[in-house]
Image (cartoon, grey):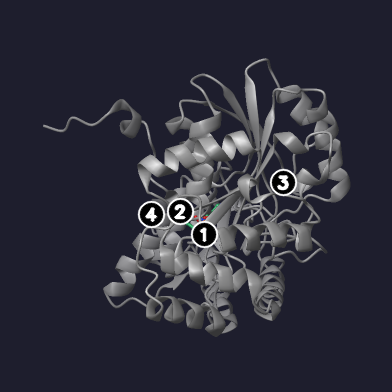
């Protein structure tokens, strides 16, 4: 008989990973599925980063690394914050983990106590809500709308704060919507937070380099709340290194130290070879980052062009990341061959089984009726996928 903990029983599986798996399975059966579900760059990791990993293998980087990461990697991250964000950190403010997801999990476990509230603007990335649950915190979702480009206002933040609020989870550029907060919008949020000295900000900036609207703005730039901001970042998205599993946090010493204690008991830190590769990513030529960003921008426009041709679809123009998040509510309730599409999940299953395109239902991100489309795929596949999407939707009545 299964004897699972209540903790794991209350946890939902990751919908992004589940839809990716469904797409993969169909593909393995020989179906020509175009996978627009999981969010990861389709590019291979740049050659100079591969070379650094090979050199690390040849150089026998075989032993346990320091739990928080190699000192030269911590320094490279400090330098990155200075160079790209004009933020001053010391190596003791930084810790490297097994992907940004792991950095986030460490922070949740070390910051959130049972019953404490975490404000999560919705739509939100699937793992936030589940990680808050693992930490026994309480999710307080704040709904945003396509009309406001899915951004939370200062007033909404103010209204959501209670004496139990421990943290705000802010993702910009956002997964799943692609929205990017401007400096002024962040300043307005920081002004609210300045009045609430017990509230921390977990700023997920993993899509920093995939930004189409100018330089990245971090909420950590505002001095009045700076000590209460923890930045989560990593090399997965900007350097096409999702499989290498290297993420990092930057925050107050005491929190980094606590995360180190946890990580020391859970994983002993990240993989040596992957850390040497991440060092090359952060210190090497940055041209690859801009080249990939430019390709994503071209693909965003390709997708938006098609969205504009689909009847009844509302779609914001994402300022970053590699997702569009159209509202397909108009197609929920329609039928095909006597089969009714009742939910966005039904719609995604229909699109997969009939249209052979894998996407993720908006309900997984707290936004029923929407569908997340990742355009981290070739232009050719995207063109084909958009035609399939249009045909599949047109067959509904
Ligand atoms: N935050 C967001 C918003 C993401 O989309 C992802 C991608 N999975 C992560 C964190 C985690 O990144 P990593 O692959 O480095 O764990
Ligand atoms: N961030 C990606 C996504 O949202 C990767 C999958 C995951 O880690 O959940 O699709």
Q: Which residue is mark 1?
A: 70
Q: Residue at x 71, y 49 (%)?
A: 89
Whichever of labels 1 and 4 marks the residue nearer the N terminus, that label is: 4
SS state under label 3? loop
Spatial CA distance of label 2 from label 1 is: 6 Å
Of all residues, the one furthest to the left in this rendering is 1
Vertical arrangement, residue 365 with respect to residue 235, above or below = above
Spatial CA distance of label 2 from label 3 is: 40 Å
Q: Nearer the viewer, residue 199 or 43?
A: 199
- Dot 4 alpha-carbon crowd within 10 angstroms: few under 14, some 14 to 19, many 20 or more: some
SS state under label 4? helix
Q: Nearer the viewer, residue 164 or 121?
A: 164
Task: Report the disc number at residue 371.
Answer: none
| In contact (CB < 8 Å): disc 4 and disc 2 | no
Residue 60: x, y in percent? 37, 74
Task: Report the disc number at residue 66.
Answer: 2
Vertical arrangement, residue 281 with respect to residue 396, above or below = below
Residue 174: x, y in percent? 66, 52
Q: Nearer the viewer, residue 253 or 223?
A: 253
Whichever of labels 3 and 4 marks the residue nearer the N terminus, that label is: 4
- Dot 2 alpha-carbon crowd within 10 angstroms: few under 14, some 14 to 19, many 20 or more: some
Spatial CA distance of label 1 from label 4 is: 34 Å
Q: Nearer the viewer, mark 2 or mark 3?
A: 2
Task: Report the disc number at residue 150.
Answer: 3
Spatial CA distance of label 3 from label 4 is: 24 Å
Q: Nearer the viewer, residue 355 or 173?
A: 173
Of all residues, the one furthest to the top in this rendering is 163
SS state under label 1? loop
Q: Which residue is mark 4?
A: 18
Spatial CA distance of label 4 from label 2 is: 34 Å
Can see residue 210? yes
Q: Residue at x 43, y 81 (%)?
A: 54
């Amino acid at each position: 008989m299964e004897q699972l903990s209540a903790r794991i029983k209350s946890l939902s599986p990751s919908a992004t990973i589940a839809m990716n798996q469904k797409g993969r399975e169909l593909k393995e059966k020989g179906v020509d599925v175009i996978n627009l579900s999981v969010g990861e760059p389709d590019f291979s990791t740049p050659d100079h980063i591969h070379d650094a990993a090979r050199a690390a293998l040849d150089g026998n980087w075989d032993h346990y690394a320091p739990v928080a990461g190699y000192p030269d990697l911590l320094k490279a991250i400090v330098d990155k914050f200075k160079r790209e964000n004009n933020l001053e950190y010391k190596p003791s403010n930084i810790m490297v983990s097994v992907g940004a997801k792991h950095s986030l999990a460490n922070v949740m476990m070390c910051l959130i106590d049972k019953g404490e509230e975490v404000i999560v603007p919705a739509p939100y990335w699937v793992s936030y809500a589940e990680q808050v649950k693992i930490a026994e915190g309480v999710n307080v979702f704040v709904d945003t709308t396509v009309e406001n480009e899915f951004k939370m206002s200062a007033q909404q933040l103010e209204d959501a704060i209670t004496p139990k609020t421990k943290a705000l989870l802010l993702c910009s550029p956002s997964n799943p919507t692609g929205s990017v907060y401007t400096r002024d919008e962040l300043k307005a949020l920081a002004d609210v937070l300045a009045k609430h000295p017990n509230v921390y900000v977990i700023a997920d900036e993993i899509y920093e380099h995939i930004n189409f609207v100018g330089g990245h703005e971090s909420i950590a730039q505002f001095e009045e709340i700076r000590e209460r901001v923890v930045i989560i970042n990593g090399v997965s998205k900007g350097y096409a290194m999702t499989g290498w599993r290297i993420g990092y946090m930057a925050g107050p010493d005491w929190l980094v130290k606590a995360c180190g204690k946890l990580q020391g008991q859970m994983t002993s830190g990240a993989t040596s070879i992957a850390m040497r590769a991440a060092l090359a990513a952060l210190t090497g030529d940055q041209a690859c980052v801009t080249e990939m960003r430019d390709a994503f921008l071209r693909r965003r426009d390709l997708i938006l062009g098609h969205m504009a041709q689909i009847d009844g679809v509302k779609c914001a123009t994402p300022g970053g990341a590699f997702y569009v998040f159209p509202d397909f509510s108009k197609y929920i309730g329609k039928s095909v061959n006597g089969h009714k599409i009742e939910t966005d999940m039904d719609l995604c299953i229909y699109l997969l089984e009939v249209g052979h395109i894998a996407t993720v239902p908006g309900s997984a991100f707290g936004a029923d009726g929407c569908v997340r489309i990742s355009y981290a795929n070739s232009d050719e596949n995207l063109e084909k996928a958009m035609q399939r999407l249009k045909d599949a939707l047109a067959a509904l009545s």
